[in-house]
Amino acid sequence: MCGVFGIYAPGEPVARLTYFGIYALQHRGQESAGIVAADERHGLSFQRDMGLVSQVFDEQTIGGMTGDVAIGHTRYSTSGSSTTAHAQPLFAPSLFGPLAMAHNGNLVNVAALRRETEGPRVPEATDSELALRSIVQAPGRSWADKVAHAMGRMDGAYCLVMLTPSQIIACRDPLGVRPLCLGRYKSGWVVASESCALETIGAEFVRELEPGELVTIDADGVHTQQPVPPRPRSLCVFEFIYFARPDSIISGRSVYEARYEMGRQLAREHGVEADLVIGVPDSATAAAAGYAEEAGLPFREGLIKNRYIGRTFIQPHQSQREGAVALKFNALPSVLGGKRVIVVDDSIVRGTTTPPIVSLIRRAGAREVHLRITAPPMTDPCYLGIDVARKSELIASRLSVPEIAQAVGADSLGYLSLPSLERAVGVSGGLCSGCFTGTYPVQISVADAELLATAR
């Protein structure tokens, strides 16, 4: 669920524009951030470190990074430890010169890539590092040839944005698991995980990259090819439930409108006598408004969010997730006191952050707390970009819905069904819902599944 950004714009402040681009993608990863800028005269300049975008970069750093091209990355780790050593963009030397790369997604054939690129050495290499090595070691007369060959060897989810001193290269896996879009900036071009990053820098959205597509951007413009044939489209449904910013457009669908419709569908499936509806900010706010409209109930703000606390679901360690909840929200007794409250949230994953939220609402005086979730029960691990790789971590894999309601302290609990979720999202083509069904768009061996789990 990382954020990736790249820009080719000679004569423009590409490092500064990349800073604003990854700032707009901060919600996709809060562990580390990095930018690489380059031109053919001075080579590469870069900065990457642990922390938020605003913590890693300052005016002096950005001002010292010049060039015609730049890429940036915000990291949410699903492979490899949360350390500076794994911060991106990554670098590799080659006979063609240096290559920098930013990766969003998760590869599933890690064991095979490791054998092909490094043998038994350096077993701690992340899937992103293996992808970079696969590209550098691939045959080809150009970087585009090398990337095209490597795409045929990689399996799983990947959106790659790469930089050489004279070009930007971007590709998307043939399943289309993660989003990647192309935009126009003045006389240059931009690629980004979400359209919200284009709007932030004043770029014009052009289109999304197709699954299996490879794009090269240089002085001659945009060149596209399809080295890997697309497979049945499997866009991650969690992009709409939680990951993406509500002002983004993915597969032609407004994320905000999709979430609003999830709330409406949820009200139809799990209505209950209540006095008001609140959402857990921010990802469930639109859904709560949709639920309230469909149910004919008032929509109120019952939880106030500290805007300086990040997203608890994507914290790398459980202790951080639990501690962040206590800092993240305050409840409003004037709104909740004596009321029967419907609380709309986007998901329950491990089941550890929900009880403090329910408890907070009860301490504010709520008479009843009815929890409504815009996702189906998450019963199976995700191998394609969510940091949950063991079934035993998931509360819905162990407990029934009434048991989960009891465990989190709610008076009732209702999950949106998968058919209703798919109707609410309303995009053409397929969605990956493996975390709800256990059916994945890729084959995952037992050995690779265990390898992916231990890589967390």
Image (cartoon, rainbow, N blue to C red):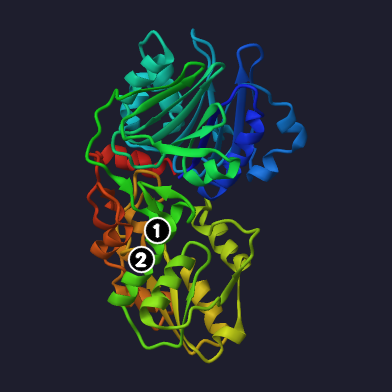
Question: Which quadrant would residue 379 be assigned to in this image?
Answer: bottom left
Residue 374, position in %: x, y? 37, 66
Amino acid on which the number 1 mark rests in the picture? Ile
Q: Is residue 371 visible?
A: no
Residue at position x 40%, y 62% from top?
A: 259
Q: Which residue is mark 2?
A: 262
Kindly identify the residue that appears in the image at 52 percent across and 73 percent down: 357
Q: Which residue is mark 1?
A: 241
Q: CA distance from mark 2 to mark 1?
A: 9 Å
Specify the amino acid type for callout 2: Met
- Find residue 230 and report its image quarter: top left
In x, y percent, where is residue 39? Answer: 61, 17
In the rendered image, which quarter contains the C terminus? top left
Q: Is residue 166 left or right of residue 182?
A: right
Query: Mark 2 against mark 1, which lies toward the viewer?
Result: 2
Pointers 2 and 1 in contact (C-beta within 8 Å): yes
